[in-house]
Structures are given as C-alpha cells and as structure tokens.
Amino acid sequence: MGTAIGILAAQRGYTVAAVGGRNQKKVAAAAWQIGPEVKATTILQAAAAARLVLISVSDDAIVRIAENLAQNRALTPQAVVVHLSGALSSDILNVVRD
C-alpha cells in the first residue's frame, strides 16, 4: 500500500524524497516504481528528511517503528507521522509526539 500511495502522490505533484525499510531490495523496487529521483534508504534516514512520514507496515510492527523513530530522534520537529492501519487508532503513535 505504501508504494501505491507514493506513486499516486508523485503523480499528483508531491515530492516523494525517500522510501525507507529493512529489506533493501524491496525498498529499491518501491523507490524505482515511485520515481527516478526517490532515494532508497533506511527507515531512520528517510524519516530524518521527511515532513510527512507514512508508516506502511503490518499492524503489529507500527509501535516498534514509532518507538525506533522516537528513540533515535529521527524526526524533525515539524514532521507529521501517520500509519496506514485501518484497525488501529492514531494513539499508538503517541511515542513520537514528544
């Protein structure tokens, strides 16, 4: 789902700077599909440069990703972080609010 949103955002004129993830083959494929200027990188590096961070992982991994972003201070103060789960509340991202 994250790749599809990235493609649609790029097609509508939004800048998609980077795609981050653990599996660099999948990350590189997603970045290539979104556009030639999109960087394939780690989650922390992608988040550090982003104004909008979309967490598109399985529901059971969302909290772990958010905690990792917070613990590593990977977000800019202006960053907005959202997850793409339809089953979970945005409250699970409270860890990144501070």
Image (tube, rainbow, N blue to C red):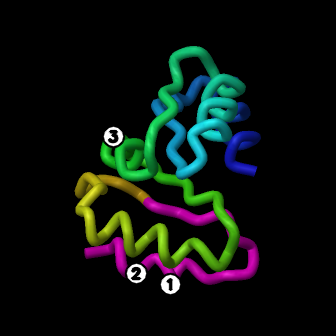
How many numbered marks are there?
A: 3
Residue at image position (55%, 29%) is 14
- Quarter of the image holding residue 83? bottom right
The stretch drawn in magenta includes residue 24: no
How far is the residue under mark 1 from the one under mark 2?
Answer: 5 Å
What is the number of the mark on residue 94?
A: 2
The quadrant of the picture occupied by the C terminus is bottom left
| Residue 20 in the image, given as x and y percentages of width and height | 51, 44
Going from the N terminus, do you reach mark 3 or mark 1 first?
A: 3
Q: Amino acid at mark 1?
A: Asp
Label 2 to label 3, Cα distance in Å?
A: 20 Å
Given this view, does label 3 or label 1 mark the residue nearer the observer? Answer: 3
The image's mark for residue 91 is 1
Q: Is disc 2 placed on a helix, strand or loop?
A: helix
Q: Are the residues flagged by discs 1 and 2 in contact, CB closer than 8 Å?
A: yes
Residue span colored magenta: 81-98
